[in-house]
Amino acid sequence: MPRYDEQILEEIKSRLPIEDVIGNRIQLKRSGSSLVGCCPFHQEKTPSFHVNSGKQFYHCFGCGESGDIFKFLMRYEGLTFQDAVERLAAQAGVKLIVTDNPKAKLRARLYALNADLAAFYQRCLSQTAEAAPAREYLAKRKLSDAVVEAFGIGYAPARVKNCLLTWADKHGYTPEEMIAAGVLSEPKNPRAPNDYFDRFRGRLMFPIRDTQGRVVAFSGRILDAKAHPAKYVNSPETEVFTKGRVLYALDRAAAPITKHPRREVIVCEGQIDVIRCHASGFDTAIASQGTAFTPDHVKLVKRYADCAVLVFDGDNAGRKAALRTGALFLAESIPVRVAALPPGDDPDSMLRDRGPQPFQELLDGARSITEFQIETLRRGEASPDSIDAVNRISRKVLEMLAGCPAATLRSRLLQEASDLLHLPFSALEEDLDQLREQQQKRAAQKIEWAKDAHSESRNAPTDQYDLPVEDAPDIAEDFEPGEVPPDPPPLNERLLCELLIECEHQRNVLELIREHLPVDMVTHPFAQSLMETIFNELDKGEDLLPQFCQSADPKWQPLIAELTAGSQKLLCAQEISPEEAAKDLITAIWIAHTEKLRGQLSNESSPENDAQRLRLTCLIKSLRNLPWDKSVKLMHR
């Protein structure tokens, strides 16, 4: 986080009177020495929000909110301190000088490059003959020129060879910067050093912006579905873009969300759905960027929103996605409702064909996540009122509610479940308390396993790390009688799978694992396949995990459900960083691998065997006892 000199902050304040900054956002009236208005941070009819021009300070006597222009912008628009300073500095014409961030220059270049490239793509869409099919596609989707321009939609040319290299040279950008921005890939043929690959050629281009409105990435949609299996291709993660931390159109939706009477956000599945919502007056709509919603996404939304309504497709896949996303919002204590669309509809088609009123009615009738979950689960039961079905449904509901830390919200939804399932509230409450206690103990135990796996039972065989019977995942429940379920991964490899899924979009963690843990050192076939999928996703910038989960062998589906459920994540206790967890697991798997090699040596004494056994024993001891920065060097000898 950059540190700003106090004099610079004071200079910004002096150039931007607080009454102007706040007065441009809420209505203020003079009252004595102060300006007063209705507080934007809580609902009130009698103004209690006071702005003191002389002290450059605001205070609400109703809710207690107070601060300067930076604090106001952070609270009003949900910005970080850095974002608030940068936005106000730009408005005031004050140049920010940050000396403690060596990558600031590269980020500045990437921001400029992306902005220039977005403008180039827009010109290509509107002015080139090649882009005629793209214009026809947008016209067919009934997206007006004004909407296309507002969202910066463009077209990436394909017919002119080395078009982007020519453009980059003309605008003063190097091929290396184009690669760093994720729009070009390095030549793969050493005999053709200038044969760069244009990631987006021939695609309709959607600029992706951060909360400050800066273009940080692109999403390209293919126009001919037969030409390429991937409908959308997204920018890979770069110095300015982490897809797990960027939400489409949040830069436009942030202010409307904070001004909404309930501070409610609309969460859609696709970019065109969001564009249609904004064009139809539903300007609090957002979507994830080329991936399923993540905990980081929810934390970002929480800066602006107090509640959420999910508008997902009404098919089985859409319902499952809504339940996964709803669980993430509950985990951040955010009330969430689900507006289930009619089969075959999405927000774009519904608004385009029927107008805003039916869509508004759909939002108004959205059900709580618990009611939606119960209805979805009952649909999947042949006899939903039978005792076994009610038991299964109540168990799933309690698993979701167990992840909600807010007692009031949890209790309210539990009461709703009690009414819908016709079960005593006290019985559900008792089961929920037991489940939460079990999960807390399990989470704490997993943290200890991850920290100490490489130091406990030093001479035990590799399978010492298997889960205890009482904590083993119940992957047998989905198998027919007499069918033998597959062996689960050893504990460390299972924990590695959890970490890979949880940190799917954290490049630093994935690169750490890839650099120091060879895939063939992992013994379990499922864990190996998952590693390869995540690493391919990292290289290609495509969201491959959902396809992997859907196409995996049916025998692994229960394990996948366990890993992706979200209730038993490795880092859920928040007592260990992802990097620390990765280092511990890498070390533990290296130790297990080395112990296995030592166990495969012949028992006969010979100079070669004895020397090899001594070398492996010394390596195991060093890996257990040395700090990471020293032990990691031994892994690459």
Image (cartoon, rainbow, N blue to C red):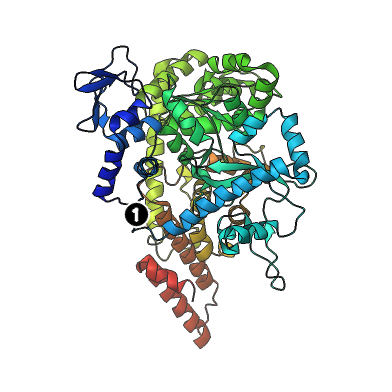
Foreground pick, 456 / 190: 190
Q: Position of residue 267 (x, y in %)?
A: 54, 29
Foreground pick, 508 / 137: 137
Return the residue found at the far bottom: 607
Query: Is residue 73 shown left or right of residue 344?
Result: left
Foreground pick, 242 / 474: 242
Query: Which residue is drawn at the image coordinates 48% and 65% (left, top)?
Result: 590
Tell me: residue 618, above or below residue 512: below
Tell me: residue 615, above or below residue 212: below
Density class for disc 1 (Cα within 10 Å; few <14, some 14-19, many ≥20) is few
The residue pinned by badge 1 equals 97
Q: Which residue type carries mark 1? A: Ile
Query: Which residue is drawn at the image coordinates 26% and 39% (left, top)?
Result: 14
Query: Which residue is drawn at the image coordinates 49% and 40% (left, top)?
Result: 213
Q: Where is residue 310 in the image (x, y as percent from the top left)?
A: 55, 26
Secondary structure beneath label 1: loop
Q: Where is residue 609 in the image (x, y as percent from the top left)?
A: 51, 82
